[in-house]
Amino acid sequence: MSAAARLLCFHKQKTSARTRFLCHGASVLHGAALPADARVRAAAAPVRPHPAPYLLALEQALGLAAGSLRAEPEFQVEVDTADGPVAVLLAEFVAIDPPLAAASAAGARFIALTEARGLPPVELELLRRAYELLIG
């Protein structure tokens, strides 16, 4: 997976709207954690990476069928790092229930927003923006 983008993934329960985010170790970003000095940009660039290869890479890493993730096009966020800008893409697990077993087998877990307190400030800001979009 290119360093040009990271995935922030969530599952929103259709009946209760319970929203959980996929967490890999100490990061909610798939593709690699961001550097400590990363900062969310005020506005995203007009050209963004296509989400398909990132979605496919995560589906394969979790052992899920193609099409298990759907990109959320309304989420337009970029992060500044010393190595240049990084696009953050938001993706939803489309199944009725989150793939808990697949996540666990890959060393990941689903967390509620309230469980994210120990994450780096840049990831907390990304979660805040994603949650605002999701609750509309």
Image: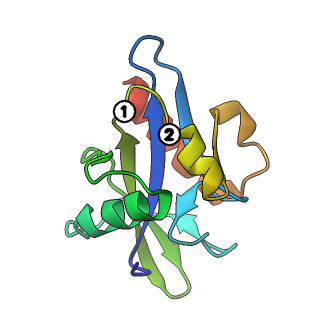
Q: Residue at x 42, y 77 (%)?
A: 85
Residue that lies at the very extreme toward the right in this rendered image? 118
Q: Residues within 10 Å of mark 1 (few under 14, many from 20)?
A: some
Q: Nearer the viewer, residue 105 or 126?
A: 105
Label count reads 2
Give x and y (percent) for residue 16: 48, 12
Q: Residue at x 70, y 72 (%)?
A: 36
Which residue is depicted at the point 44% across and 59% down?
Answer: 7
SS for callout 2: loop
Give above or below for 98 relative to 64. Answer: above
Instruction: Identify the disc placed on residue 41.
Output: none
- Asked whether 69 or 10 is in front, the reply is 69
Front residue of 32/127: it is: 32
Residue 82 lies left or right of residue 76; in this view the side is right
The percent coordinates of residue 87 (x first, y second) are 38, 67
* Distance from Cα at disc 1 to Cα at disc 2: 8 Å
Task: Report if residue 88 is visible in the image.
Answer: no
Q: Residues within 10 Å of mark 2 (few under 14, many from 20)?
A: some
Quadrant where the image shows the C terminus: top left
The residue furthest bottom is: 83
Q: Which residue is mark 2?
A: 99
Residue type pointed to by label 1: Ala
Residue 133 higher or lower than 82, as above or below: above
Q: Is residue 85 visible?
A: yes
Q: Which amino acid type is shown beneath numbered disc 2? A: Pro
Secondary element at image label 1: loop
Q: Identify which residue is drawn at 40% across, 63% down.
A: 60
**Answer yes or no: do the residues labelled 1 and 2 have beta carbons within 8 Å?**
yes
Of the 4 image quadrants, the one containing the N terminus is: bottom left
Disc 1 target residue: 95
Quarter of the image where one finds residue 96: top left
Vertically, is 81 above or below 9? below
